[in-house]
Amino acid sequence: MPRPDIRVASVVAGLTLSAVALLDPSPALAAEAVVLAKGHTDAIDVHYEGGALKLKVKDDTVSPAVERDPADVTFQVLPAAETTVPDLPAFSFLGQAGSKIWMLPQVQDAALLWPGWNTGQLDSGVFAGNKVVISLIGVDGPGDVTLFDTNSLGTPNVKFRSSDGLPDRLDVPVHTHAHASWVFSAQGAYTLKFQADAALTNGTTVSTGPIDYRFVVGDRQSGGGDVGLSVSGMAEGDYQPGTTVTLQAVQSPQGPLTKYQWFAKKAGEDDYTPIQGETGASYSFTATRALNATDYVVRLYDGETVAAESNPVTLWVAPPSSGSSAAKSVTATIQASEGALVISVDPEDRTVTLPAATLAAAGDRWESSGALRPVTVTDTRAAKPGWTASGQVADGFRTEDGQSFAGGYLGWTPSITQQGDEQGVVAGPVAAPYVAGQPGTGLGDSAALASAPNGQGLGTAELDAALKLSVPTDTAAGTYTGTLTLTAI
């Protein structure tokens, strides 16, 4: 009696996903000069490395975030920051009521820069009192500079103020991330000198010394009016096949234009081809050997006019490992009445470790991204009933000490990396991570990775997905592990 078609594939349980060092991000160091004019940045990002205290700039206007040398950054206070001093006695320290000021507010305005300070990289028990001192020791510019915040009742509290004399000192506990209003009394170019100091628990004192921070208030008059465009995110070395590549368009200075188009030129091709649907500031895709030596550029548009074009960046994908080979003729017979549907992962590649989470640009989520890496579905059933492959993190993520969060905070963007010419496999829809009040349940519920319709699917398909973890900022720090169960039916 013929064996019936198998409708349920083997289930792969135990593909381990780890979110490492949550709330302890370590962004890569970027070296290019940039102008930051919109989005979140920890302008004063305090680090202690190799026995030295350092000030860096954590740039969250790009994804993933990068650390920058303050010498490579110009902070722009856009003309839209113009406002007037409130007619309230409590704000008289800003000047005469009704006079013009340019303010980057304490609460984020998406149209302006949102700078803050951060000691989240500093460990407890290293510094006396578990604190460092951040000082504004000098201001060179056409006007006065004031940093202040307000409490829940709207009462202002001045942090730094150049008009009544400097230096001004601020004690900042370790593991602090804070924002204030930055106020400038006149347009023009400023140099602010910040310094961080601390005493170690053994009594030794450490200091960054004065560090210059450049600000431009209003329209930038120097450096010309043309916008520069570059691409960040491309690694210098080879990518392994199946790795997710995320490229980011970086404007310098950052301006109001937001219309992009990404282009690719494969090895041996003469012209760049537009990448369909890729019109955002970032572009993510999966590295395959077929894409090795492909050049990518991005263009910025003002209406239909090209405002800027980046220099090309090149993708290099690692070749297969070398070794000897031999051939042998093999004859096999497949009976039409038999077959199976199997989903599998490489036994040597069953663990996915996501990079350390970083603060999202809006400052309201901890996020990390990575690649699922190849999942194989093989259908040998002659009847071609079609199939659907799906995944779920049903039991959520946990740390060894019992902290946890739901699997719905992990989402994916599926892709097909390889299939037969007539196999007809299509990638599943994006499963966005869960955010309260928004659609999307991530991988907390079963989500489709790929499918083949009835009458197709025969053969072997290789699937992948770009993973995105997004959890609330009150999630406890730790290394979390969960199990993604993959099923094909």
Image (tube, rainbow, N blue to C red):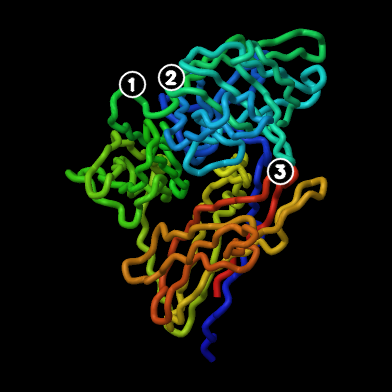
**Amino acid at dot 3:** Thr
Q: Which comes before the other along the chain, label 2 or label 1?
A: 2
Question: Which residue in the structure is indicated by mark 3?
Answer: 479
From the viewer's perspective, is the residue at label 3 or at label 2 nearer?
2
Question: Which residue in the structure is indicated by mark 1?
Answer: 222
From the viewer's perspective, is the residue at label 1 or at label 3 nearer?
1
Q: Nearer the viewer, residue 411 or 270?
A: 411
Picture quadrant where residue 133 is located: top right
Task: For the residues labelled 1 and 3, say whether their Cβ atoms are less than 8 Å apart.
Answer: no
The N terminus sits in image quarter: bottom right
Task: For the residues labelled 2 and 1, say whether their Cβ atoms are less than 8 Å apart.
Answer: yes
**Amino acid at dot 2:** Ala
State the residue at coordinates (65%, 47%): 18
**Which numbered disc covers residue 189?**
2
The C terminus sits in image quarter: bottom right
Picture quadrant where residue 151 is located: top right
State the residue at coordinates (35%, 66%): 420
